[in-house]
Structures are given as structure tokens and as C-alpha cells.
Image: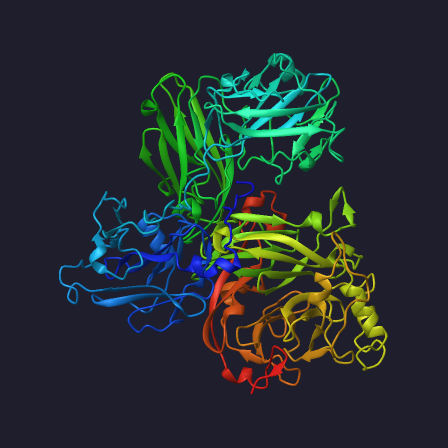
């Protein structure tokens, strides 16, 4: 899937928070089973509920006992699970997809006679259930079989209103892989149950049009959903707005990702003019012609309008005129009837537009608005077909509907999507019964994937392929279907397998240079220093990102190379409530010190939802942090003497950033005050005569300066105020990340200014720091081998939720220079983007309580 579609979740209004919270109810539980116990809660209301700060407890009745905030936001009708087991293993046992909300590791275990308590962020009890077949004679006992609540029992704390599950009952209960019976993940107590694993279904949209051109006008319709669409009975009309005017039934079934075309030319002439193969579906001879000012209306078989586009360049200021050049829709304009969200085609643009034989410009026949690739020209006429059912295949794989695709895997990875979830295939035979097809599986390199590593299950026209890697390298996996006439069709997978990682590691694909991350429920937002796309990954499952948010267009980037803006080199992030701040490195080019002005950006985004429903929107930016820092140092703004920090010399053109006297920002954290941010440097090291301490500078009003930016721009240079610089002894290392923990103290990832060798000080360490400039950071004991074996330690994912004492820290590597497949090619240079990867892992820390001594919290010294 090229762009995973985030499910839109409407957040409850602040004034309705109490009402919304009151609609979260306990809907199912099992206190003991062959597998782990669980409690299901469901949002039975009409507004989304953010579970940040919420908690669970048993009969102890203490709010905050077990945090469930990682479940994120519950959409109306959505259920979530609390279990003592591992979240991933629980999903597997019950056949739940990765999007199902599960928080594992609950240590407040239920017993035969117990209480279930759910508390909101304020510590108020939202729901309670007392149960026990011994305490309440005649009531159910949920050992190996779950219990679910009736409508009357919802929120009533009456166990007599609960029913013991049975396979196929009113809650669609089923057996888990361990033999327990229940229906965790979906409750009929919700007015409209929300299924996070449900496919999008077919979704036809207008994606391109040209009202006048030398080869005829045309309209392109694309299935941007994840299921085939049967267009029998569908129709088109212009501004007459009458369903049934022009039939589109001849398009037949439109596959996910497939585009079809409607023109006033003949179908054959149109294909010839645009060099389309005969398999591209074109309906020609339209006599309901489009005008310069008109509408395009698409109707389904019931006469309901599915999509509309109103256009008129004379009446709608700033809109396009599609004479001889087509227009194509942006992601924001898809299905929105907003002509201002349409772009005029140009040869070689983002839609790969080209010229027709008559000189028109456009890209009819394929749209990047589709979630999935579909090649109508693949295969041969009359032969069997093997396609991927993209609606049923995990979003952590991105496979074209037909032809083939690419997959990356890691040996021994329990969450490898091609092994754990599998690839769902569909078989078709235009000339006969699919059950009569002969199926074969082939691996071109048995050392990477042996024949025994290819498993095909299922029957009829639906099969699931699971691939188990045996060695490192590449293999071509071919699934072939052959009919009685010896005609065959195939699906080909370019497969790459990496060596096993450390225990518990996860292998995130589609990017390699992870450089900053912010946790969001059971997902995380990850920046890659090679671009401006922030990717949303599940924290505990390997594979591709499930969504992404690209802010290139919002950042006013002026340094262009080959028509594409050079990277911002995002290196740090800090979260303040619903705002996340992201900073570029503000550095020169790595290998020659050339100026890179695009990197001089620090910007904010607003986060809504959490987990799989996380969404980001651009807020504002500041473009002059580097300039202000250099001027402040040069003008002796710190009182240490002009150029005491040497920042102007460090940032000078020709100076590489990865030197002890270079200039390279890699950390960003909330400062103790309400308006400031800490800027943390990988380089330079200070003082000038020793170069052995890391630099942190408190930009005291940076948050307010970013917020004050005019729309689409930045506040003026010279807006920032800085406090005295802070020098930290990290053993001769610079700062790779800095995060303010829940206590107000800071956790730092320290590493070499240049490349790591594994020998101090060119290695990676973790430190805790009080936040007080007078306090020395404290070295923490942590085995970082699982991360450093995969690349550079770059990001502390969940440090913001840690406090004093023992805690589990999630880390992410920058693996851009790692060679994964024994081919000598570093990850960032792999031509197949889906086979690039970085690694996440966990370490246990013991953060000393003393780190909080003399700590300033929110501007006041802590007693």
C-alpha cells in the first residue's frame, strides 16, 4: 500500500469529555484460560474517547494501578483489550489484526471472585463489575470461556446480566488457538460496532479529466479502495445531474488501484493516442460532452451519487483550465468536489504525465491516488490470474494487486508480516473452475527461502502464502496457477531476508535513516533524515508504516536539486500536549561542508488521536534558529565573550558537521519553562580549548516564536532569546537525543561526533540528567548491543513516560549505512524502498531517584 489510509476519528469536544468518558463500558472478560485472561472495554457512545491517563485495577480499587493510556483513542463503537499476556501473541491467538487495540503486561490479575475497575485520567471510576460464581450464586464462571454483557447490564455492575460465551452466539464468539471461547475485539453493545480490521471496500473516485484536447476529452475513474468494484448499473452525467444518463456498466469489475477511462473518442483511437495497452478499460463514444464550465457526476447502481467535481476556471478564481492539459486530484481533494485541490498536468510531474500523439499532456490510465498498484497490462488473455487480496493482506506489506511486489523479512522475527500475517491471494480462471487449477510455489534461491519455507493454505479461490526465511540474501518467489490447457498466470515476489536481530527487536521497513520518534499509544511517529515524511508504525510489529504525513510543501524549502527540495534532515522531536516540535539538523552537508539551507527549519505539528488513528497536521515554523544562535554567540549575548562558543566558525561553509568543531543539532526537548525548548548538539563539543563536553542551549521563547509565525511563513530573524549555554560531560560524546521524562528530569542518548567504532568515546551511552546546569549527568548501565548492532542509536521512543526507578526504554536505530542482505549495498542506497529498514529494541533501565534532586520543574525548584 503506497499510502496507508488512516481511519478518521472525530475527537470529542472538550465540553463533552465527561459524557464521552461515561460511555466507555466493560463489555467482556475472562478471568482464567488456556491463554491469558482479558478484559474488553468498548466505547458505546457517539464521540471518540482519548484514553490517555486512564487505568485499570482489580478489587484493590486504586486508580492508576495499571495504565491503559497506550490504547490511545477509542472511536465510537470501538473495543480495546487489557490482558496479562503479550499484546502481539494475544492478537495472534484470537485472530485479531495489528490494528486491534490491545495493551499487554497487566500484572493486576483477576481471580475467580474479583472486581474490574476502569478509571479515567482524573482518577474517576468510569465503570465497575463485581463478579464471582461463589459470591453471586447462579452467576457465570469465566474460566476458559468469556462472559459478555447484555444491554440491560451495560454499566450496571450486575453480573446476573452477563452471559457465558458459546461458539457462534449473538456476539459471534469463537475459539482461540489455545481453545478458549470468546469474542474479544468487537462488541454488539455498541450502537455501531467499529471494526479496525474491516477493509475499506471498493471506492471509485474521479482522479483526472480533460475537457478539450486534440485526442478527445476524457474522465478517469480510479478504485482507491481495497476491494474490487462491480460497475454494473453505474453511470455518468455532466451538470444535468441525472443518474443513468450514460452507462458505465461496460467497465465491469474494477480492481483496487485500477483506473478506467471515459472519452468522446473511440476506445481504440484513445488507447493509440496515449499508448495504452488493450487491457486498459476505455468506454468511448461519449456524447454528453464536457464544457469549459461543467460538472462530472458519478453514480452507483442505485442512482446514488458517489463523486462529483465542479469546475469553471472563469468563475472559480485560481482554478485550472484543462484544455490540452489534463487536471489531476490531490490527496486532499479526493472525493471532495474542490477544484482548487486539482493540479494542471506537466510532463514528468508527480503523476508521470506525458504527451499524447496529438500533443495533449496527461497521465490517463493510472493514478497515484490509488492505495495499491494495479497493472492492467500484466498477464495474457484467457490465462489464470493470481492476485493479492489487498483488503485482507496486512497493511504492513505493500504489494501490487497483480504482477508482483517486494517484501523484506528478518530471520527469526516473530512479527514478520509475510510469515506471521501471510499474503492473501486470489485465484481466477476466465475459462474454468479455479478448483481445477494446478498451483506451484518456487523460490529461486533455496539458501534464502527453501521449498519447505513456502506454505500455502486455504481452498477455492482464496489462499494464504506464508514465507519463512532460511538465510540472508535475495530470492524470487513465484506463485503460479496453471489450467488444463497449460495456460498459466503468476504472481512474483522480490524477497529479501536479513540476518536475525537481537531478542525482541522489531524491523521497520520502507525507510532506513530513522532520526527522531514520538510515541503515540501503541504506535510511533518516526522521522527519517532523508525526507520530510513522518511515518506511523506500530511499535510492536515489524513491517511497513501504516500511515505517513509529508510536510515538504509547508516548510518553504528553497534549496532544490533536480526539481525536488533537498532534505530538512529532521533530527530531533519534542512533544508538548497536542503539539510536536521537529527540528532539522541546521548543519552543512556531511561529506564536503556545502551549505544546506533547507536544514534550517524547526516546525510544529498538531497530533490528534493515537495508535493507528494518529493524525498530524502542520501548525507553524521558524526559519532562523541557526542565524539567531550565531548572532547571539558573536554578539556576546551569553556574557562569555564574543564567539566564545565558536558557532560561526563551526557553521561556516566548508566545515563538515560530523567534526568536534562542526555544527549539528540532533536533540530537542521541552525546557522547564512554558515557552522554551532545549537545543542539543551532536557538534560542536566545548570548550574551545578542550572539545570534550556536549552543548545544550535553552531557547527560552522558541515555542512562542514558532506559534507567532504568519500563515505559510516564519517570524523574523532575531526573534529568539537564549539562556546561558550548558556544557555536559558525556565522556567526550555529543548528544544524539534528549527527552524530558515524566519527572521533569532528562534522558540523553550520547554518541560520537563522527562514526562509531564501539570503543569509547566513539560508542553510545545513556545518561540521566536533572535538568540543572550545575548537575553532572549520570551514566546509566544499559546493554545497547541490540540497537548498535543495527546502526547508530538515534532515538528514545518512550522516554517521556519514564520516571525514576526501573523502566523499559524503547530505542530506534539509524540503519542507513547498514548492509542487510550480504550484497554490499547500504540500506539507504537500496533501489527497492520497501526493503530498506531500521531496527527498534528495548532495554531495561534503573534511573536513580537522585537524578531528580535540585530539579527545576515548570520554572520552580523542586523541594
Q: Horizontal placement of 347 versus 380: left or right?
A: right
The spot of residue 310 in percent (x, y) is 65, 29
Looking at the picture, tell me which residue is in the foreground, 616 or 175.
616
Q: Is residue 144 visible?
A: no
Q: Quadrant of the C terminus?
A: bottom right
Q: Horizontal placement of 466 versus 760: left or right?
A: left
Q: Quadrant of residue 54?
A: bottom left
Residue closest to the far bottom: 863
Q: Is residue 404 visible?
A: yes
Residue closest to the far left: 137
203 w.r.t. 683: above or below? above
107 w.r.t. 234: above or below? below
201 w.r.t. 105: above or below? above
Looking at the picture, tell me which residue is in the foreground, 114 or 800.
114
Q: Residue at x 56, y 41 (%)?
A: 2
The spot of residue 293 in percent (x, y) is 71, 24
The spot of residue 856 in percent (x, y) is 61, 81
Q: Horizontal placement of 717 versus 214: left or right?
A: right
Q: Residue at x 45, y 49 (%)?
A: 471
Amino acid at each position: 500500500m503506497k499510502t496507508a489510509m488512516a481511519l478518521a476519528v472525530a475527537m470529542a469536544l472538550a465540553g463533552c469529555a465527561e459524557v464521552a468518558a461515561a460511555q466507555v463500558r466493560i463489555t467482556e472478560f475472562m478471568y482464567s484460560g488456556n491463554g491469558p485472561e482479558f478484559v474488553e472495554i468498548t466505547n458505546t457512545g457517539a464521540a471518540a474517547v482519548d484514553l490517555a491517563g486512564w487505568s485499570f485495577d482489580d478489587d484493590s480499587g486504586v486508580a492508576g494501578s495499571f495504565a491503559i493510556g497506550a490504547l490511545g483513542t477509542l472511536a465510537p463503537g470501538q473495543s480495546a483489550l487489557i490482558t496479562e499476556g503479550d499484546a502481539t501473541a494475544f492478537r495472534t491467538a484470537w485472530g485479531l489484526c495489528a490494528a486491534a487495540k490491545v495493551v499487554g503486561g497487566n500484572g493486576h490479575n483477576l481471580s475467580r471472585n474479583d472486581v474490574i475497575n476502569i478509571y479515567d485520567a482524573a482518577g474517576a471510576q468510569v465503570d465497575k463489575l463485581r463478579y464471582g460464581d461463589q459470591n453471586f450464586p447462579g452467576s457465570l464462571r469465566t474460566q476458559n470461556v468469556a462472559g459478555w454483557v447484555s444491554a440491560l447490564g451495560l454499566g450496571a455492575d450486575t453480573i446476573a446480566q452477563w452471559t457465558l460465551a458459546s461458539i457462534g452466539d449473538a456476539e459471534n464468539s469463537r475459539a482461540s488457538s489455545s481453545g478458549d471461547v470468546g469474542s474479544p475485539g468487537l462488541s454488539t453493545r455498541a450502537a455501531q460496532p467499529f471494526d479496525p480490521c474491516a477493509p475499506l471496500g471498493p471506492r471509485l473516485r474521479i482522479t483526472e479529466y480533460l475537457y478539450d484536447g486534440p485526442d478527445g476529452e476524457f474522465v478517469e475513474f480510479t478504485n482507491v479502495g481495497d476491494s474490487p468494484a462491480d460497475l454494473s448499473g453505474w453511470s455518468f452525467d455532466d451538470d444535468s445531474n441525472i443518474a443513468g444518463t450514460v452507462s458505465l456498466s461496460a467497465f465491469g469489475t474494477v480492481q483496487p488501484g485500477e483506473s478506467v477511462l471515459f472519452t468522446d473518442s473511440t476506445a481504440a483511437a484513445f488507447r493509440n493516442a496515449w499508448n495504452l495497452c488493450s487491457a486498459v478499460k476505455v468506454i468511448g463514444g461519449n456524447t454528453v460532452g464536457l464544457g469549459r464550465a461543467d460538472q462530472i457526476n458519478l453514480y452507483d447502481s442505485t442512482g446514488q451519487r458517489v463523486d462529483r467535481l465542479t469546475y469553471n476556471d472563469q468563475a472559480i478564481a485560481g482554478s485550472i483550465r484543462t484544455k490540452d492539459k489534463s487536471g489531476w486530484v490531490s490527496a486532499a481533494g479526493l472525493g471532495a468536489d474542490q477544484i482548487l485541490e486539482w493540479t494542471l498536468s506537466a510532463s514528468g510531474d508527480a503523476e508521470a504525465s506525458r504527451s499524447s500523439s496529438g500533443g495533449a499532456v496527461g497521465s490517463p490510465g493510472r493514478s497515484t491516488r490509488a492505495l495499491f498498484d494495479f497493472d492492467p497490462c500484466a498477464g495474457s488473455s484467457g490465462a489464470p490470474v493470481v492476485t493479492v487480496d489487498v483488503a485482507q493482506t496486512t497493511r504492513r506489506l505493500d504489494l501490487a494487486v497483480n504482477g508482483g511486489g517486494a517484501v523484506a523479512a528478518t530471520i527469526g522475527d516473530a512479527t514478520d508480516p509475510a510469515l506471521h500475517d501471510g499474503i492473501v491471494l486470489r485465484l481466477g480462471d476466465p475459462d474454468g473452475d479455479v478448483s481445477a487449477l494446478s498451483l506451484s510455489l518456487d523460490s529461486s534461491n533455496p539458501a534464502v527461502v527453501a521449498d519447505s519455507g513456502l506454505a500455502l493454505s486455504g481452498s477455492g479461490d482464496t489462499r494464504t502464502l506464508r514465507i519463512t526465511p532460511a538465510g540472508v540474501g535475495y530470492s524470487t518467489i513465484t506463485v503460479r496457477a496453471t489450467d488444463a490447457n497449460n495456460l498459466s498466470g503468476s504472481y512474483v515476489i522480490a524477497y529479501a531476508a536479513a540476518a536475525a536481530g537481537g531478542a525482541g527487536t522489531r524491523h521497520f521497513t520502507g525507510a532506513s535513516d530513522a532520526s527522531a520518534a514520538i510515541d503515540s499509544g501503541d504506535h510511533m511517529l518516526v522521522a527519517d533524515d532523508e525526507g520530510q515524511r513522518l511515518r506511523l508504525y506500530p511499535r510492536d510489529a515489524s513491517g511497513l508504516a501504516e500511515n505517513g504525513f509529508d510536510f515538504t510543501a509547508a516548510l518553504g524549502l528553497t534549496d532544490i536539486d533536480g526539481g525536488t527540495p533537498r532534505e530538512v534532515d529532521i533530527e530531533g522531536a519534542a512533544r508538548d500536549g497536542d503539539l510536536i516540535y521537529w527540528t532539522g539538523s541546521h548543519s552543512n552537508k556531511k561529506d564536503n561542508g556545502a551549505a544546506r539551507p533547507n536544514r534550517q527549519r524547526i516546525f510544529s505539528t498538531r497530533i490528534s488521536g493515537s495508535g493507528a488513528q494518529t493524525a498530524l497536521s502542520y501548525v507553524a515554523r521558524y526559519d532562523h534558529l541557526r542565524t539567531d544562535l550565531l548572532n547571539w554567540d558573536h554578539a556576546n549575548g551569553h556574557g562569555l565573550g564574543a564567539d566564545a562558543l565558536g558557532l560561526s566558525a563551526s557553521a561556516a561553509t566548508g566545515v563538515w558537521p560530523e567534526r568536534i568543531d562542526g555544527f549539528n543539532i540532533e536533540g530537542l526537548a521541552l525546557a522547564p519553562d512554558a515557552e522554551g525548548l532545549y537545543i542539543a548538539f551532536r557538534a560542536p563539543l566545548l570548550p574551545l580549548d578542550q572539545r570534550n563536553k556536549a552543548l545544550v542551549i535553552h531557547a527560552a521563547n522558541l515555542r512562542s516564536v514558532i506559534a507567532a509565525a504568519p500563515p505559510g511563513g516564519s517570524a523574523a530573524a532575531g526573534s529568539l532569546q537564549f539562556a546561558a549555554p550548558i556544557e555536559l560531560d558525556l565522556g567526550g560524546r555529543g548528544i544524539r537525543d534528549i527527552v524530558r521524562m515524566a519527572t521533569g528530569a532528562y534522558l540523553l542518548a550520547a554518541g560520537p561526533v563522527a562514526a562509531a567504532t564501539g570503543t569509547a568515546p566513539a560508542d553510545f551511552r545513556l545518561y540521566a540528567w536533572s535538568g540543572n546546569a550545575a548537575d553532572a549527568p549520570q551514566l546509566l548501565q544499559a546493554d545497547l548491543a541490540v540497537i548498535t548492532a543495527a546502526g547508530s542509536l538515534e532515538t528514545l521512543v518512550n522516554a517521556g513516560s519514564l520516571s525514576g526507578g526501573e523502566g523499559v526504554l524503547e530505542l530506534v536505530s539509524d540503519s542507513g549505512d547498514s548492509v542487510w542482505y550480504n550484497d554490499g549495498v547500504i540500506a539507504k542506497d537500496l533501489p527497492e524502498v520497501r526493503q530498506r529498514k531500521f531496527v527498534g529494541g528495548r532495554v531495561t533501565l534503573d534511573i536513580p531517584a537522585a537524578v531528580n534532586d535540585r530539579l527545576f520543574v515548570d520554572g520552580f525548584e523542586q523541594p
